[in-house]
Image (cartoon, grey):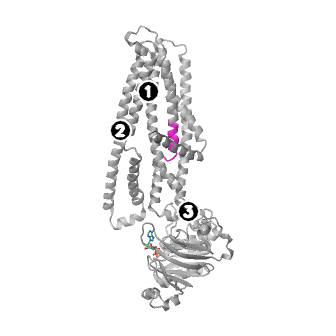
Amino acid sequence: MRSNFLLSHKKALKSLKKVLKIDKQIIYTSIFESFLTGIYPYLSLFLVNIVIDSLIYKKFDNLPKNVIFLLLLIYLTGILIDFLKSINDYKTKNIHKKFIYMISEKSMTIDYEEMEKGDFLQKLSDARYVIEHLGGYDIFINYYISILSKIVVIISSFFMIIKMCFTKSINHDIGRFSIISNSYILLSIILSFMLLNIFLSRLISKKSKMRTAEGYQNKMKVERRLNYYVDKVFSNVNFGKDIRIFQMQDYILSLYEDTLNASISFYNKFYHETIKNKESLNKIIMFIAQLSAYTLIIFKVYFKSISIGTMSRYIGVLYMFNNSINELIDINQKISLQSSFIEVFDELLNLPNKKESGNRKISSIKNNRYIIEFHNVSYRYENSKDFALKNISYSFRFNSKFGIVGKNGSGKTTLIKLLTRLYDPTDGYITLNGIDIRQFKYEDYLSLFSIVFQDYQLFAFPISVNISANLHPNIEKVRFAISEVGMSDKVDKLANKENTSLFKMEKDGINFSAGELQKLAIARAIYKDSPIAIFDEPTAALDPESEYEIFKNMSQLINRRAGVFISHRMGSCRFCDNILVLDKGRIVQIGSHEELLKDRSKLYYKLYSTQANHYIE
Ligand code: ADP
């Protein structure tokens, strides 16, 4: 139990360290806020004490002076607390943003291979949830501010209680109540009630089953399911089309209703327990403890050892003491929960970016002579029993044009992902000019390639930013790339030309057709001007002859550079110097179009002849 307590505070303090790394000053402003919040309630208690005593004992000499002084003090302290609170709020919001930024950064820099795994996506969504809904790391600041202010209250009220117990009675003739007037006995009685309060509060907080890490984990699951409908389905324009055409509204709404009902019953349980355990029972215990303590204080007044005004102050002090103890126990439980949630964030951030381990520079390679060689490379996807690629050995000499052809699912895209180090081989290795590609700086290695994927993505950013992949595009280069893909006329007609945003996220954004967007994706590859350009079936939606034409145009566009053209249609790559034919993850043929056609018993000829009537020779 104790070790749990220490462990969660150790974790929480470690988290706090992370917060302080982002903003050191917050520690001073927080301590100051805690201290002032701790002493603030006493000021009003003193004020009430003075006023009541003056009225009862009819001593008004110093009353106006004291009241004005205390009111002023209360007012100024209140303003100062508000001021510090808003500073701390502002700071915590910034810290919060920084943590969200860290998750976003991680999700864009983590190895692509890792990103594809379900485990990563789960961690990412849990970490987001912890940060956005449970307060992330910054909530620890609030917790510790509260802890400090509660400690200030507990210590100060404790001394006040001792002082009260040891105030001597004026009336000594108190007969059978003399036991209560004994300071030590009085103190022990009050403390026993308080200990009882502590014991019962802890018992209740431990009994609270829903408020465990598991309970919150279930809460995350419930919310994730709800969010899927709200964020991904209802507001997604692309879903909008299919939902209408296939008239899926009723079906989706009924699924949503089930999820909603499940979440309502979960929340009923979740909050019911809070109300049942925390609110009612806690209040009853506190009431009993308080009532007993109040009775004792009233005795003190009766025996004239304290004034009625002082009594009101002590009642307030006792209330604050008990309340602070309960809240302290509550915060402790929250800290222990939060420190177990926050682990998911740490796990996410600590996932290694293996691809970034190399530090060799590519610039040391002379004359742009790149030879990338696969050495018996195999690749198998996670959770898949078959290899997507098996024993590939081939040397790509990037001074010419390559075609990679094969049926769908034959491993073409996987090969490109290995070539560009989006994946690392399961077996075998790949070298660049004889050196294992893992030794090169990842950024340097990636700079060798520009790729147009089949499922390329453009963003709701200005056209120029999309093409340059840079916030400060070289406009001349952007315009050149646009003209190379034949989009100049179209773009020049837009009010903001290449500064127009794509898609309708912005009011003046532009929606292009699929073909036009594809041209912009190709312009992006032209802008990057890398030594090796790869086109992974970006033309699959077109008819075979158009694909051939576009591939040939692309090949001319990248004239000076090496190109890799990928297609499931044999004829589309017939302009290439060398064509690799893939089948079931293996290279089954290599040669020029003419050479490959010669062997009529092999796949290339067979597939080409069935597809050939689509080509106009
Ligand atoms: P191609 O590009 O030739 O169509 P791919 O390289 O995409 O082929 O796929 C090769 C094999 O790997 C296929 O059997 C495919 O189902 C499988 N595959 C592709 N991507 C994944 C993935 N992310 N997870 C599991 N299997 C995959």
Residue at numbered disc 3: 354
Mark 3 / mark 2, whichever is N-terminal: 2
In the displayed structure, 152 sits above or below 233; it is above
Residue at numbered disc 1: 319
The reply, left or right, for residue 22 in relation to residue 566 is right
Instruction: Estimate how packed mark 3 is, as few (under 14), some (14 to 19) or many (20 or more) residues with alpha carbons within 10 Å.
Output: few
Mark 1 / mark 3, whichever is N-terminal: 1
Q: What element carries label 1?
A: helix
Nearer the observer, 93 or 279: 279
Q: Distance between the residues labelled 2 and 1?
A: 21 Å
Judge whether residue 330 is colored magenta: no
In the displayed structure, 13 sits above or below 58; it is below
- Which range of residues does the magenta coloring cover? 134-146
Location of residue 485 in the rendering, given as x and y in whole percent from the top left corner = 56, 76
Q: Residue furthest top?
A: 173
Location of residue 136 in the rendering, given as x and y in whole percent from the top left corner = 49, 47
Residue at numbered disc 2: 275
Location of residue 509 in the rendering, given as x and y in whole percent from the top left corner = 51, 63
Q: Is residue 220 visible?
A: yes
In the displayed structure, 212 sits above or below 241; it is above
Instruction: Estimate how packed mark 2 is, as few (under 14), some (14 to 19) or many (20 or more) residues with alpha carbons within 10 Å.
Output: few
Is the residue marked 1 within 8 Å of ligand 1, measured from its CB? Answer: no
Q: Is mark 3 on a helix, strand or loop?
A: helix
Q: Nearer the viewer, mark 1 or mark 3?
A: 3
The reply, left or right, for residue 275 in relation to residue 147 is left
